[in-house]
């Protein structure tokens, strides 16, 4: 379809039909604004569909600023306070969507993620939002207003909202579009890197542990003042599972991680308890872990004799390692396996109340494209809803 010579005049153009984009479009439309929502995929909400194992972990009741990484840790407080998990839950309930709490405040749909996508589409429909899918924006320019050109036409608007997400899940259409728009208008974009991502072994640990792929154990991982107690999953290439994904956002290349393999127990006391039974270390560890991991870990630290025959210093060393196993990693699995992108449009460039660029009136950034990244467990969705609400009320 050729572009008309005169752009169509609307109040708001939202680029990106994911969680934040749909939410913002609906809120702005319900305020009486003429809103166009542009999505480059053939349908909206693709990332919503696969989230939470297909059941969409749509928020977390325990959401607070401490659950987010940002160069300005307090930036997210305003938006989160003005649109809370309970506000979103009320919206979910108003659409008759059944949900449940899985653990640690995480809220999931009882059936599937399409319920949330459908709800957001209903809200957009109610707000008379014009939805354009398979729409690729080719240029944006600003005179006294914004002009957006695409393969489906041209629009002019006073308010432009960028909700195009990060670099993770390229197979779902993720691109660097939002970061490029920020740079086009002279805004700072902080360092980008994969977050909530599996970590890969060094060659030494690859050779030792890769054959344990599929084994999962509960651990506590500590790093840079953060601590997560969740499951660790061994893969062919490294470690994954919720505990690793959480800590990966804090880990940087070249750093080792400290893993407590007996969370809530003293490693030294554990060994003392089993010393009386005549157990070897492997036999003792089999009471806690899968057989293959117990054997491999015992072999790694060369402790095959009965615990009672080990020297006091060796037992102290093993006890300390059980509670603080230090292991290096080569890197991450990268954006293809990352749940989110760390970094983004610098929060120093944006109003925390409205998400508007301070130096470019009428230009807004919301959701993952902003340098606000949540933990695993519904926090990134809540940031999408809260930042979308802030912008939707302001455009």
Image (tube, rainbow, N blue to C red):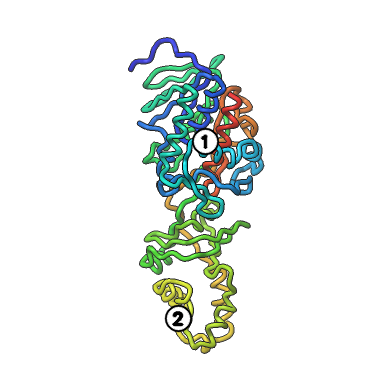
Q: Are marks 2 and 1 in contact (CB under 8 Å)?
A: no
Image x and y of residue 35, in percent: 49, 21
Residue 189 against residue 227 in the figure, above or below: above
Question: Horizontally, is 186 left or right of 164 in the view?
Answer: right
Foreground residue, 276 or 59? 59
Name the residue that disc number 1 marks. 94
Question: Which residue is at a point 57% across and 28% down the rendered structure image?
Answer: 392
The residue wearing badge 2 is 283
The extreme left residue here reads: 1
**Which quarter shows the N terminus?**
top left
Query: Is 222 above or below relative to 179?
Result: below
| Badge 2 or badge 1: first in the primary sequence | 1
Which of the two marks, 2 or 1, is nearer to us in this view? 1
Residue 162 location (% of width, % of height) = 51, 29
Q: Residue at x 60, y 31 (%)?
A: 390
Q: In the rendered image, which quarter contains the C terminus? A: top right
């Amino acid at each position: 379809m050729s572009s008309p010579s005169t752009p169509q005049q609307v109040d708001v153009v939202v680029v990106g039909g994911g969680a934040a984009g749909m939410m913002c479009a609906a809120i702005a439309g319900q305020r009486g604004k003429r809103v166009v929502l542009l999505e480059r995929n053939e349908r909206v909400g693709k990332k919503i569909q696969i989230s939470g194992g297909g059941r969409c972990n749509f928020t977390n009741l325990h959401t607070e600023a401490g659950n987010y990484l940002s160069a300005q840790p307090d930036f997210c407080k305003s938006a989160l306070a003005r649109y809370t998990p309970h506000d979103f839950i009320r919206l979910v309930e108003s659409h008759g969507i059944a949900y449940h709490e899985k653990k640690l405040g995480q809220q999931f749909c009882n059936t599937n993620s399409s319920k949330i996508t459908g709800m957001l589409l209903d809200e957009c429909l109610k707000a008379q939002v014009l939805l354009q899918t398979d729409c690729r924006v080719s240029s944006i320019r600003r005179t006294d207003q914004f002009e957006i050109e695409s393969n489906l036409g041209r629009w002019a608007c006073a308010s432009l909202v960028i909700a195009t997400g990060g670099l993770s899940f390229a197979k779902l259409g993720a691109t660097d579009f939002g970061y490029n728009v920020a740079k086009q208008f002279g805004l700072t974009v902080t360092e980008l890197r994969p977050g909530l991502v599996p970590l890969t072994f060094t060659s030494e640990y690859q050779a030792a542990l890769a054959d344990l792929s599929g084994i999962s154990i509960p651990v506590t991982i500590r790093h840079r003042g953060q601590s997560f107690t969740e499951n660790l999953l061994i893969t062919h290439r490294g470690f994954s599972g919720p505990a690793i994904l959480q800590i990966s956002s804090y880990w940087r290349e070249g750093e080792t991680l400290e893993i407590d393999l007996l969370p809530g127990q003293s490693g030294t006391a554990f060994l003392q308890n089993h010393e009386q039974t005549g157990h070897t270390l492997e036999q003792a560890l089999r009471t806690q872990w899968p057989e293959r991991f117990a054997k491999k870990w015992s072999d790694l630290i060369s402790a095959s004799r009965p615990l009672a025959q080990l020297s006091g210093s060796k037992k102290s060393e093993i006890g300390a390692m059980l509670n603080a196993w230090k292991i290096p990693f080569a890197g991450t699995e990268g954006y293809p396996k990352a749940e989110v992108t760390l970094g983004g449009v610098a929060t120093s460039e944006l109003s925390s109340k409205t998400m508007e660029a301070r130096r470019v009136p009428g230009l807004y950034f919301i959701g993952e494209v902003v340098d606000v990244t949540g933990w695993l467990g519904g926090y990134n969705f809540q940031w999408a809803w809260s930042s979308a609400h802030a912008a939707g009320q302001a455009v």
